[in-house]
Amino acid sequence: MPGRPAGSWALLGPLLWSCALALRGGMLYPRESPSRERKELDGLWSFRADFSAGRHEGFEQQWYRRPLRESGPTVDMPVPSSFNDVSQDGQLRNFIGWVWYEREVTLPQRWIQDPDTRVVLRIGSAHYYAIVWVNGVHVTEHEGGHLPFEADISKLVQSGLTAQTASGPMSDFYTLPVGIRTVAVTESRFLINGKPFYFHGVNKHEDSDIRGRGFDLTLLVKDFHLLRWLGANSFRTSHYPYAEEVMQLCDRYGIVVIDECPGVGIVLPQNYGNVSLQHHLEVMEELVRRDKNHPAVVMWSVANEPKSFLKPAGYYFKTVIAHTKALDPSRPVTFVTNSNYTTDLGAPYVDVICINSYYSWYHDYGHLELIRLQLESQFESWYGAYQKPIIQSEYGAETIAGFHQDPPLMFTEEYQKSMLEQYHLVLDQKRKEYVVGELVWNFADFMTNQSPQRPVGNKKGIFTRQRQPKSAAFLLRDRYWRLANETRYHRSSVRPRCLGNSPFTF
Ligand code: GCB
């Protein structure tokens, strides 16, 4: 593996590299100390289940001899986790047999160069029978899960491999995956690489049971499996920037992102003051600085549902949007509005109009039959006023999984479905003209403050907070895959390498 300080790849996990010296007769938990370092190998591993009839193909073909991707397709698997639970693949859920995990690891140069450093590979727990290879060499086996085992691999990794450049040994390494594409907006279209792009996606939250808001790799991979299941091609980071790991996966799997800053709750005149404005500009600087290298990000959203009809809103949004464009001239900028088209003072400055509307929910509730009329008039009025492409950036209905009524009543699964269907009738007309996207509210149920409108949190998810589908998820799944098939372009026969091992490549 040229160009790496240590080209090491290991099969099976979860693993932990450490310089720890195992106590003779015992096994110490690897703790850092002035003489010991550890390197966590948790994270995304390449994975393949051996579905061959005898479950033995991996051994027959010696999958351990080469990087796993070279012997067949792989998927990303979070470690630690149970592969059965993360996947949406029914076959994998019930799989019994050999599965192969692989991870490429870059070791600190010193570990490799110093012959006195002992390098130990430790597996905390692997079910049920584990065989471990490093660089194709068998290093250990272990029977039974739950308990740790380890192997001294010093000799294997200290094989004298030192990365060199033409000018001598390198002292710093950084790798950055790169993706290149263009984004542009016309009067009625959103273009990616010069081709019309239609957002069929979701709004998300970083939220789940127990963890609440916080990065969780296993949950993230589950969510990406669900996005794939759904046929979604995009999401908005409502209402704040998400963890960088999320953005990395979007790049990897080709999920298009509207990247939103935490500009939520700009609803009082004093929110438009100078202190607020200055802070908003700084936040946009931080966001653009962090995410500008992610090709998945195609548009910045500077706010969600501000009271953009208040007098200072015009100057405020003109300034924030101009500043964001100056920071990044390559991407369009928007904010998400729920104001009226006649009074919105920020809309003149956005590139794309993003509208949230909850017809038949927060007003005229129960009146599904009014949606078509109201939505049509919403689109026509906004387009008439601005001649800019429009995204339906939120729409949805509170739905308690397991509540059923026919004819549909609010809070039931039938109501959520019927409401989506009514929206889709109009979206299908208008997407032929100037509507360039639809993002349902919300991907999954999430926790909120208590209020009479929130039956233990916001229940507008098409999945529950535990990531199980409500009836509407199946409706949307049919629609999104239809849209995907209708609007996608032929892929060239050359697949980009970074997507080579993704289950999400379209
Ligand atoms: C909205 C907000 C979103 C809420 C949603 C709702 O307009 O943008 O943050 O969660 O409505 O369900 O009320």
Image: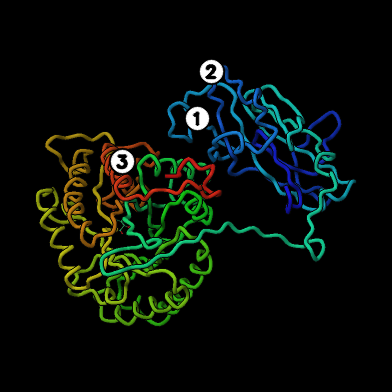
Type of amino acid at the residue the image marks with label 1: Asn
Vertical side of 90 occupied by 476: above or below: below
**Residue 62, position as x, y percentages in the image:** 67, 28
> Mark 1 vs mark 3: which is more N-terminal?
1
Q: Earlier in the sequence, mark 1 or mark 2?
A: 2
Label 2, label 3: how far apart the Cα atoms are: 32 Å
The label nearer to you, 1 versus 3, is 3
Residue 84, disc = 1
The residue at label 1 has a CB less than 8 Å from ligand 1: no
Image position of 259 (left or right of 307): right
Q: Secondary structure at mark 3?
A: helix
Q: Which numbered circle lies on residue 317? A: none
Query: Could you tell me which residue is drawn at 80 percent across and 49 percent down?
Result: 33
Query: Are the two marked residues, 2 and 3, in contact with CB atoms closer than 8 angstroms?
Result: no
Category of crowding for the residue at label 2, using alpha-carbon neighbours closer than 10 angstroms: few (below 14), some (14–19), many (at least 20): few
Q: CA distance from mark 1 to mark 2?
A: 19 Å
| In front of the other: 57 or 96 | 57
Which amino acid type corresponds to the residue marked 3 in the rendered image?
Answer: Arg
Q: Which residue is at 75% across, 41% downward? A: 30
Ligand 1 is found in the corner quadrant, namely bottom left
Left or right: residue 155 compared with residue 434: right
Mark 2 and mark 3 lie on one chain; the one further toward the N terminus is: 2
Q: Which residue is mark 2?
A: 53
Which of the 4 quarters of the picture holds residue 143? top right
Give the residue at x 87% y 50%. Answer: 114
- 10 Å crowding of disc 1: few (<14), some (14-19), many (20+): some
Q: Is residue 417 above or below residue 263?
A: above
Q: Which residue is mark 3?
A: 477
> Tag 1, which secondary structure?
helix
Q: Report the quarter where the C terminus lies.
A: top left
